[in-house]
Image: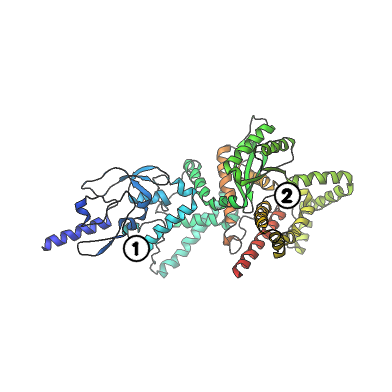
Amino acid sequence: MVFGKSKRKRVEVEASEEQEFQVTDAQEISDSEDPIDREDAKHDTQQTPNNKPKVCECNMKPLLQEVVVIGDYKSNNTGGSKQWMCKHCKASFKSSYTTIHYHFFGAPDGKKTGIQRCKELMRDLALHDRIRAKVLHAEKEDISLSLKNSTLMEKNSPAPSRPLHEAFGLMERETVDLKVIRGLCSAGVPFNALRNPEFVDMLMAMNKAPKGYKPPSYEKARTSMLDECKRNLERDLIPIQETWYTQGVSIVSDGWSNTKHNPLINVLAVNSRGAMFMYADDFSGIEKTRKTISNYLLKAIEDIGPPNVLQIVTDNAKNCQVAGREIEKVHKHIFWSPCVCHTLNLIFKDFAKAFPWLRDRYKDGKNIVKYYINHSHILAIFREHSKLELLKVAETIFASHYTLLRRLLDYREQLVTTVCLSKWKDLVTNADASTGAKLVEVAKKVLSQPVSSSSAERNWSTYSYIHSVKRNRLNNARADKLVFIHSNIHLLSRFSKSYTFGPYKYWDIDPESSKMEESITRMQELMWSIDNEEGSNNSKL
């Protein structure tokens, strides 16, 4: 009797700790846990021979509810890999339960995924959060031992206190710091990268890497790892893309030539959440006619979704104007808008022709700045009496009209406050309740759209930074991926609290650069201040 009891206990322990997928016949169900039910589980608990409730397999391993097991496995070997199909992406694999976890949430740091990620979960953020919450609940309740190695929960074990070892570690820390500085200097990376939270996260991940970790090779970094990084960033951009349904979006496009003199045309999706870079295509050997441009922009509209697009913003070139009219014929609700900065540029050119003094005063201002910067002794005297640097003219086609833009920015807060006051809201909604509500939604979408193609032109600065003279062998496809990652990482960082407070405040603005577009910085600060005021008012309500 004693031998029989110990044997039965040993079998139960092995079945609960080691078994990934358990498939038993009808006679074994009464003495052990339920196997994987290919349909939904009907009961959360069951009774053992000792009348003790046991947790259902679907609760111990909640991800089993998200897959369908294929085939019949009635064998003495209860472990090993099983054939299964994901209910969401309909992909079939043969693996263990741990790999199912990697399929939905990815592998932990330092481990290879070994399986394709679920595309539906990467697209549907709500579905991803629902399944993740279910798995987190199982882990926090400590229902299953097999979830202890999950990638979702952080296991922090207290390290033993070793004061003597930490004292000697200061010298090692200084040695590592010196290696970091030498690496930055040899690669030509500016010290402003040390304020980049992504750079700090990279170093922290290396601390948790396996012993003897080496960075990826040159070929791996520029091929598979670059593609994986872009796919990961696309999932992070889903919350911004979801605002396109409520606020609408404008497609902003502009042309440029890289260091190889390849003509490129980019596409950006812009609304109140910022400018999201989509892609840029090479038009080498292709004439930029109205038909070519209209077809290119129509493709961008289909990629984003025609119901979400409100307008197309380009420069005032004749072929762009005709292409905009062609798009308006295809999609009646989408209208073409010329860039307001290009329009102002043309207006001030006419002003300069009509009023020579205006052109002369602008030239005088440029000559004064140039004189101070080119004479070091005079510049040193100026710096003794001023804490600010003289700013050079920004390298944009409308930077010469800085005075007008500055005046608009100075009074932008008053303009925005006008439409944010309760009097404005009462004036709109009290006229007609039903019509007013619809008008508010339309006004929200219209006021969220840009009026210029400056975001598309600033994107070419990112292109020139990445596709520089030193990297002139970079092909357009790989440069497009690098620009996508670089631009959209900066976009995502704007929504984190660490961007406006703390050591990483405005980390992507180089304080050592004298070619700062002050108008852009000022506009962003005004937008952040308005958002903060709205957030504080909502919290009071």
Which residue has dot 2 on it?
394
Which residue has dot 1 on it?
142
Q: In which quarter of the image is the C terminus?
A: bottom right
Q: What residue type is labelled 1?
A: Asp
Residue 326 percent location from the top left of the image: 68, 36
**Is 530 above or below relative to 216?**
below
Instruction: Determine the residue located farthest toward the left in the rendered image.
Output: 1
User: Which coloring applies here?
Assistant: rainbow
Q: Horizontally, is 162 left or right of 451 in the view?
A: left
Residue 122 percent location from the top left of the image: 47, 49
Whether residue 208 is visible, yes or no, is no
Callout 2 secondary element: loop
Q: Categorize mark 1 by other alpha carbons within 10 Å: few (<14), some (14-19), many (20+).
A: few
**Rendering quarter of residue 440:** bottom right
**Is 110 above or below relative to 326?**
below
Whether residue 37 is visible, yes or no, is yes
* Image disc number at residue 520: none
Nearer-the-camera pick, 206 or 519: 519
Callout 1 secondary element: loop
Residue 354 percent location from the top left of the image: 89, 45
Q: In which quarter of the image is the N terminus?
A: bottom left
Q: Horizontally, is 221 left or right of 468 in the view?
A: left
Residue pictured at 76% horizontal, 59% vertical: 411
Q: Categorize mark 2 by other alpha carbons within 10 Å: few (<14), some (14-19), many (20+).
A: some
